[in-house]
């Protein structure tokens, strides 16, 4: 089999599980988790330094060969998202940016309109833009036109572990977009990640389901295997479902 | 003199941005700075003299999904 690579802008990945650094009980679990699952890209967030608590630098826990994907979490409009992206790039994190603009604090659903506006600005500035959005085909097309490098539709609200609740809408994106579709948010179980890959998602991003597991390192490995299995199944092309049985043994009687 | 740091007023003696960051007990490697709403590159920090009413945002990377 030819090596199955995923290209996002100028970046290439052979592992289709992207991970996040949020909510680990101990940061020292992050490199162990990365080692166990082989994830090649991981998200980080940017915040004001808290002088009261001596926080450790999260970047110290991420091996150099793993690509950083800073997010714009905390942004409430396109201006803040653009500002965070510029700061992240200045910090030496490269030009990748996951745009996350959230105004709804109950479901943490992304503001698609503001995300499109931020994508337009940042793509022009040479960023490799990965917008986190609710799955919507006309929006995905606009993002593509605006120069997004991928689209990251949510499966379910962030951290909810509810899985692929938006499955049918994501499927429409997969069928109709040229740029990669990365299912982000809401995936709670490896089987759900596998299902996303089986239906043709290019990658999944999993944070909470790994970091909040009792054993995040083993869970990272489980997700990695699930993503790989789902991807292989997609490439091997599954047969369609049928309403009635299709015999897999000869239908003649045993002795007749 | 008074400056604004991460949204809070602070008193500091006149000094360079780099000195201020050291005074705060921060290691320059892990942080990013906006000085009066402009992102300033690390190598220029020693040349920036803080002025009365300057606005500083000191940011760092944290865990997030």
Image (spheres, coloured by chain):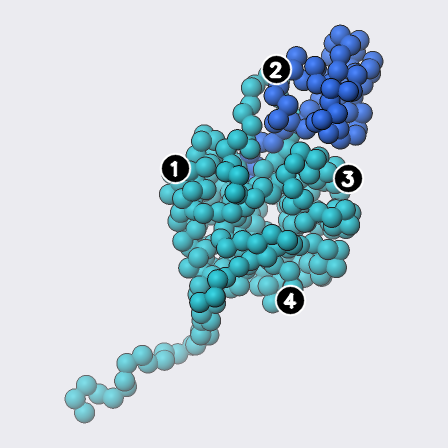
Chain colours: A cyan, B blue
Asked if disc 1 and disc 2 are in contact, CB closer than 8 Å, the reply is: no
Look at the numbered disc 3 and give the secondary structure of its residue. Answer: helix
Within-10-Å neighbours for mark 3: few <14, some 14–19, many 20+:
some
Within-10-Å neighbours for mark 2: few <14, some 14–19, many 20+:
few
Residues at marks 4 and 1 on the same chain? yes
**Circle on res. B25:** 2
Please tell me which residue is depicted at 63% across the width and 28% down the height of the picture: B60
* Whole-number angstrom distance, CA of label 3 to CA of label 2: 31 Å
Position of B57 relative to A207 (above/below) = above
What residue occupies the far bottom of the structure in this picture?
A256
Which label's residue is closer to the chain start, 1 or 3?
3
| Residue B8 position in % (x across, y down) | 73, 17
Task: Nearest to the eye among marks 4 and 2: give it.
Answer: 2
Q: Given the image, what chain letter belongs to the residue carrying mark 2?
A: B
A34 sits left or right of A86 in the view: left
* Whole-number angstrom distance, CA of label 4 to CA of label 3: 29 Å
Look at the numbered disc 2 and give the secondary structure of its residue. Answer: loop
Q: Given the image, what chain letter belongs to the residue carrying mark 3?
A: A
* Whole-number angstrom distance, CA of label 4 to CA of label 2: 52 Å
Residues at marks 3 and 2 on the same chain? no
Residue B14 seen in this snapshot? yes
Position of A118 relative to B47 (above/below) = below
Residue under pointer 3: A79
* Whole-number angstrom distance, CA of label 4 to CA of label 1: 38 Å
Q: Given the image, what chain letter belongs to the residue carrying mark 4?
A: A
| Residue B42 position in % (x across, y down) | 70, 27
Residue under pointer 1: A214
Q: Quadrant of residue A215?
A: top left
| Residue A75 position in % (x across, y down) | 70, 37
**Circle on res. A176:** 4
Look at the numbered disc 1 and give the secondary structure of its residue. Answer: loop
């Amino acid at each position: 089999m030819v090596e199955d690579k995923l290209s996002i802008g100028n970046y290439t990945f052979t592992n289709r599980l992207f991970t996040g650094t949020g909510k680990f009980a101990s940061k020292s679990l992050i490199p162990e988790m990365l080692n166990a699952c082989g994830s090649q890209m991981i998200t980080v967030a940017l915040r004001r330094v808290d002088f009261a608590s001596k926080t450790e630098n999260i970047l110290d826990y991420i091996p150099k060969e793993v690509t950083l994907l800073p997010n714009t979490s905390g942004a409430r409009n396109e201006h803040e998202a653009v500002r965070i992206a510029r700061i992240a790039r200045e910090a030496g994190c490269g030009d990748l940016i996951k745009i996350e603009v959230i105004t709804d604090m109950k479901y943490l659903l992304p503001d698609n309109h503001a995300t499109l506006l931020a994508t337009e600005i940042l793509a022009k500035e040479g960023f490799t833009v990965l917008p986190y959005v609710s799955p919507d085909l006309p929006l995905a097309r606009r993002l593509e036109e605006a120069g997004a490098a991928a689209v990251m539709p949510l499966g379910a609200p962030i951290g909810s572990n509810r899985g692929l609740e938006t499955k049918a809408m994501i499927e429409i994106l997969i069928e109709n977009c040229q740029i990669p579709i990365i299912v982000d948010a809401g995936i709670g179980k490896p089987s759900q990640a596998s299902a996303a890959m089986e239906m043709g998602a290019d990658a999944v991003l999993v944070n909470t389901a790994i970091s909040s597991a009792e054993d995040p390192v083993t869970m990272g490995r489980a997700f990695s295997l699930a993503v790989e299995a789902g991807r292989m199944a997609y490439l091997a092309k599954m047969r369609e479902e049928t309403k009635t049985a299709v015999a897999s043994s000869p239908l003649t009687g045993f002795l007749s | 003199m008074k400056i604004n740091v991460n949204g809070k007023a602070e008193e500091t003696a006149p000094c360079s941005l780099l000195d201020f960051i050291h005074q705060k007990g921060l290691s320059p490697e892990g942080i990013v700075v906006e000085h009066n709403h402009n992102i300033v590159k690390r190598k220029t920090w020693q040349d920036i003299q803080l002025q009365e009413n300057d606005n500083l945002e000191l940011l760092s990377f944290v865990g997030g999904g």
